Amino acid sequence: MLTDRQLFILQIIIDDFIRSAQPVGSRNLAKKEDVSFSPATIRNEMADLEEMGFLEKTHTSSGRVPSEKGYRYYVDHLLSPGSLRRSERTAIHSIFADRQEGLEKAVQNAATILSELTSYTSIVLGPKFNDHRVKNLQIIPIDAQSAVAIIVTDTGHVENRIFSLPEGIEPADIEKMVNILNDRLTGVPLSELRQKIYKETAELMRRHLRNYEAVLNMFAEASGGSPIGKLFIGGKTNIFNQPEFRDVEKVRLVMDMMEKEQDMYELIRPTEAGVQVKIGTENAEQAMEDCSLITASYSVGDEPVGTIAILGPKRMEYSRVITLVDFLSHDMTNVLTRLYNTRI
Amino acid sequence: MLTDRQLFILQIIIDDFIRSAQPVGSRNLAKKEDVSFSPATIRNEMADLEEMGFLEKTHTSSGRVPSEKGYRYYVDHLLSPGSLRRSERTAIHSIFADRQEGLEKAVQNAATILSELTSYTSIVLGPKFNDHRVKNLQIIPIDAQSAVAIIVTDTGHVENRIFSLPEGIEPADIEKMVNILNDRLTGVPLSELRQKIYKETAELMRRHLRNYEAVLNMFAEASGGSPIGKLFIGGKTNIFNQPEFRDVEKVRLVMDMMEKEQDMYELIRPTEAGVQVKIGTENAEQAMEDCSLITASYSVGDEPVGTIAILGPKRMEYSRVITLVDFLSHDMTNVLTRLYNTRI
DNA sequence: TGTTAGCACTCTTTGTATTTGAGTGCTAAA
DNA sequence: TTTAGCACTCAAATACAAAGAGTGCTAACA
C-alpha cells in the first residue's frame, strides 16, 4: 500500500515529467515550493516507488520516469479533475452549431478542432446509425446496360451503387419494381434490410434483374457491410512536436499505423462506456508502445454510434484531455440525440 | 557548351548519386568499369561542371552532388528511356480490370499500386468530368422540415444534399417540382447546370421552396463548386525511407504539406500536357525544396480529367518513374475513354 | 524511528584534441 | 591533353577529461 507521501511524490513526479519530458531527480523535486522534505527523503521514497514498479530509471544514475504502471495509477487515482476554459467550450459548441454543412463535415470538423485544442492527434469515428431506416429507394437507369440504385434513409443519408441491368428490361418494369421495393421496404432499419430484402423481394428481383446480387451487395454494404462509420484523423503530424519523438523511426511507426484504416478501427473500437484511457502497451497495436489513447463513445439516445479519441505520447496531459473528450462526447450525444432521436 | 566527356561524367555522377545518396568523388568514379580516365582528369571536368552550375560540393573537400540545374539537364538531355517489367505492366493493367468496385475505388487503387511500385509517394487526382450530364433529379422528403436532393449523372455519379423545406409544402407539390426539374434539366452538363437552373427554374423554385438557395448550392457544388476531383495519396510514409530525410524536421515539412488538401491541389495542378518533371524549388511549395514531382494528366477523349503524380526526393529514379507515370496515364486514358467517351 | 547530511559512485553530456580518410586544387612532367 | 604527385581541407571518428545531475548507502540527528 502506498503512503500519502508516496502518493504525493508520485503525483508530483508524473506532473513534472508530463510538463518537462525530462527525468525528474530528487534534488530538483525538493526545490519545489510545496515539497518540504529533503532530497534524501525523496530518494528513499523514490526507491520504494521504483521497487513497487511505479517509476523507472533510464540509466543507473538518472532521474526517475513514470512507468506504465505509474501512469495507470496516476490516471486511476491521482487525477485532479480538470475544467475547460470558456474558449474551449465555445469552440466545441461551435462544431455542431450550423447544421447546413451536413453531419459528415461536422464530424470532420470535430476532429480538426479536437487536435488543435490538444495539439495531439485526434480520431473521430462515425457516426453509424444502426437504426437508419429506409426512407426511399430509387433505381435510375443510366444506359441500356446499367443503372444506379439509391437508398435514402430517414436521417437523410444517401447510399448509391452502380449495377448492371439484364438485357431488354423495360423502363416500366423498373418503375414497377421501384414501387414494390418502396412499398415493402420503407421503414425497415438498415440492419434488417438484408434479410428483409431476401424474404420479401428476392423472388421478385430475380424475375426482373439478372444480377440482382449487385443490388443486394449494395444494400449489404449500406447496412451491415460497412458496419462502421467513417474515420477522420486530425493533426496527424502533431506527434512531431513531442520531444520523445525526435527519432525518425518512432515517428514512422506511428505514422504508418495511422495510414492503415483497419488498424485505426481496431485501435479505437470501443470496449465499454465512458471515457477510457489506454496507456502504451495496453493498446494491442505494436506502434502504440510509446503512446496513449483516450477514447469516449457518443450516442444517439442510448445507442452508441461513434467514437472520439485522442492519440498522444504516454506523457500526455491526461487530466485536460480526459475532460475535453468527456465534454465533447456528451455534447455530440446531446446534439445528435436531439436531431435524430425524435423519430424513434 | 558541354563536351561529350562532360556529359558522360555528369550522367555517371547523377546515376551514382541517385543510387547511393552519397557525394561522389573522382577516385571512386575512376574505378568504375566504363570510366577510362584518371581521377585527376575527372577532377578537372568536375571543376568545370561545378563552375557551370551542374554540380555542387557539400563542403570544400567533399565529393560532388548534382545541383538542381544538374538534375534538370539530366532529365532533359541525359535520360535513357526506361522500360517496364512485365510484372509492373500487369500490376497497372490490373487496376482497372474489374469495374465492379466503382471508379473511385479504382483510382484509389491506382495510388496505392503506384506508390508500391515506386516506393515513393503517389498522388492521384480525379477524375472530374466536366461533361457529366444530368440524368435524373430527385427530391426525397425526410420529415416535415427537410428533404434530400439527389442528382444522378449519366456516368452513374450521385451527388446529394440535405436542405430545409418551406412550411406546409405538399408531397404533390414536390412531385410536380421534380417532374418539372427533370423535364427542364435532363441532359444538361453539370458545368452549365448552375446558370440553366437559374434561367429555367428559379422562378418556379422560388414559388415552391423557401430556401431554394440550398438546392442551388448543392447543384453548384456538384458542378462548379468542387471543380476538382477527389485526391488520393498513396505511400505517405515512404519518404521515411530516404536517407536524406533522416531529419525529423525535413520529414515534418513534407508530411505537413501532404495533410493540406489545398496545397496538394495546387502542387499537382497540371500546367501542360504529357509527363512533367518539377525539381526541388521549381515547385512553388516551400516544403518541396528537397523533393521532386513527376506528374502526368489522363483524359477522357481529348479532355484531361485528372492527374497522377509521384512525389519523391530530388534524388529520384527519374527514368523509371517517368516511364511508369507515362504508361499509367496512358492506360487510364484508354480505359476511361473506352468507358465514358461513347456517350458523347 | 523516521529524516537528513554527507559522501562515494555512476553515467550522460559536453568539450577538446587528435587522427583518419576521402576528397580537392594545383603544378609539373609525360 | 592527360596524368602523377603533393599539399591542403574538412567531416567524421576516436579518445580523453571534466562537469553535472543523479543515485545509494551510511551514519548522525531529532
Image (cartoon, coloured by chain):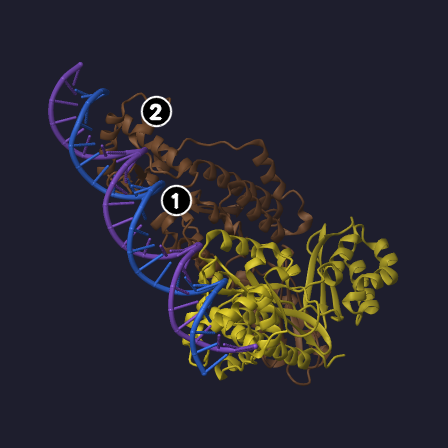
Chain colours: A yellow, B brown, C purple, D blue
* Residue A32, position as x, y percentages in the image: 42, 77
The chain carrying label 1 is B
In the shown orientation, is residue A76 left or right of residue A272?
A: left
Q: 10 Å neighbourhood of mark 2: few (<14), some, or many (≥20)?
A: few
Using the numbered discs, state the Cα–Cα distance from disc 2 to disc 1 in whole angstroms. Answer: 26 Å
Q: Is residue B204 visible?
A: no
Residue named by callout 2 = B31
Of D19 and A262, the residue lying toward us: D19
Residue located 78% across and 62% down the image: A175
* Badge 2 vs badge 1, beta-carbon distance below 8 Å: no
In the rendering, which numbered label is found on residue A234? none
The kind of residue tagged 1 is: Lys
Quarter of the image where one finds residue A76: bottom right
Reply above or below: A28 against B310: below
Front disc: 2 or 1: 2
The chain carrying label 2 is B
Reply above or below: B9 against A138: above
* Residue B163, position as x, y percentages in the image: 62, 75
Of A55 and B187, the residue lying toward us: A55
Residue named by callout 1 = B314
The kind of residue tagged 2 is: Lys
* Residue C1, position as x, y percentages in the image: 56, 77
* Residue A233, position as x, y percentages in the image: 56, 63
